[in-house]
Image: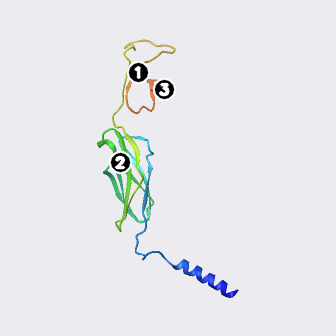
Amino acid sequence: MMRTTTAILLSIALTACSGSGTGDEPEEITCSNESPAAGTVVNDVVDVQINVTGPVTRVELLAGDAVVAGIDVAQGCVSATLSWDTTDLADGAVVLEARVTSEADAEATSDARDVTVDNTAPTASFGPDFPRISVISGEAAVPVLIEEDNVESIVLSNADGELASTTES
């Protein structure tokens, strides 16, 4: 019985000490894009949050194939915030990816994420059937023409504040 116990302990010790490879393999690095969320409409300058693992030394943001932001980070860093200036891009869909590199030239890329760039200011005007000068009391239909691809809400207001709002276009 003593021999069986010793043999089992010896087997466990050998398994725990055995390694795979030469020990010269670089530690794995990864990255994930945490914000903005997929499907988000962005404009102007946007903060992009990238989470990283492993001995990462550089974090970059790619919009399509172009590097649009980058930052060197200290090893041990677990996240980085990059400022992305969207104003140089045409309005429309953009594929975002994060890319990280290590001192050992290891590289990893995040999953792709689609966002929409919209830097064109919306325009709004009263519809052609709305009289230029009129006195309105009670409830009235107010036709409004809006030129904007990404309408989030419409608010009708005057000097005293909000009169009506809707999220339907």
Residue type, numbered disc 1: Val
Residue type, numbered disc 2: Trp
Residue at figure coordinates x 48%, y 26% from the top left:
165
Where is residue 138? Give x, y as percent. Answer: 51, 14
In the image, taking residue 2 as reference, residue 158 lies left or right, namely: left
Q: Secondary structure at mark 2?
A: strand
Indicate which disc, 3 or 1, sits on the residue closer to the N terminus. Answer: 1
For disc 2, the neighbor class at 10 Å (few under 14, some 14 to 19, many from 20) is: some
Residue at figure coordinates x 40%, y 33% from the top left:
150
Dot label at residue 144: 1
In the image, taking residue 6 as reference, residue 41 lies left or right, namely: left
Q: Quadrant of the N terminus?
A: bottom right
Whether the residues at callouts 3 and 2 have beta carbons within 8 Å, the answer is: no
Whether the residues at callouts 3 and 1 have beta carbons within 8 Å, the answer is: no
Residue at figure coordinates x 43%, y 60% from the top left:
30
Residue 147 placement: quadrant: top left
Where is residue 118? Give x, y as percent. Answer: 36, 37
Q: Secondary structure at mark 3?
A: strand
Which residue was labeled with disc 2?
A: 84
For disc 1, the neighbor class at 10 Å (few under 14, some 14 to 19, many from 20) is: some
Which residue was labeled with disc 3?
A: 165
Q: Tell me how far mark 3 sits from mark 1, CA to CA.
A: 12 Å
Q: Tell me how far mark 3 sits from mark 2, CA to CA.
A: 31 Å
Q: Quadrant of the C terminus?
A: top left
The front one of 62 and 35 is 62
